[in-house]
Image (cartoon, grey):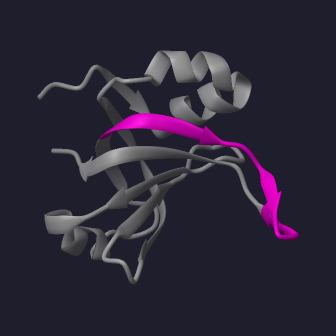
Amino acid sequence: MKADLEVTAEDVGKDFVADPKAADMKYKDKLVQVTGKVEKTEANPDEVAEITLTTGTSAPLKCGIQGLYREEVKKLQPGQKITLRGFLLQWSPETTLFGKKIEAYISISGCELGH
């Protein structure tokens, strides 16, 4: 299936940091293909691997990967350029939870490594 939008992680970051409501309207309910550089990866105990892309802003782009792509995620290196596909880009502003600061981030659901 062809993506509705093809963008860079930097563009997504700038859009959401500048105007979260406008960015939400731009990306909502669209299959988005995002290309960017890996900031970090981590494997969670619940069998979800998380990829974080740098956006050039204070809000990185995060994507949870399940299933077949999980092994591919383990091979990714910081600085490596990759493409992700998914839906529902969501802005999560900086907040404090139980006295702990949680940094702002942008997330993609239904995420998979692009081809």
Q: How many callouts does the rendering have?
A: 0
For residue 87, above or below residue 48: above
**Magenta-colored stretch includes residue 99:** yes
Q: Quadrant of the N terminus?
A: top left
Question: Residue at position x 61%, y 38% from top?
Answer: 91
Drawn side of residue 67 relative to residue 40, left or right: left
**Residue 103's image quarter?**
bottom right
Question: Residue at position x 42%, y 35% from top?
Answer: 88
Question: Residue at position x 66%, y 26% from top?
Answer: 20
**Residue 46's image quarter?**
bottom left
Q: Quadrant of the C terminus?
A: top left
Drawn side of residue 109 relative to residue 112, left or right: right
Magenta segment's dominant SS is strand
**Magenta-colored stretch includes residue 64:** no
Q: Give the magenta part as a residue range.
A: 86-101
* Camera-side residue of 58 and 22: 22
* Camera-side residue of 64 and 15: 64
> Residue 5: where, in percent of width, then height?
33, 21
> Residue 3: where, in percent of width, then height?
23, 26
Q: Which residue sits furthest bottom?
A: 45
> Residue 93: where, in percent of width, then height?
72, 44
Question: Residue at position x 25%, y 64% from top?
Answer: 66
Q: Which residue sits furthest front?
A: 98
For residue 87, above or below residue 38: above
Drawn side of residue 102 relative to residue 114, left or right: right
> Residue 105: where, in percent of width, then height?
62, 49
Drawn side of residue 62 relative to residue 59, left or right: left
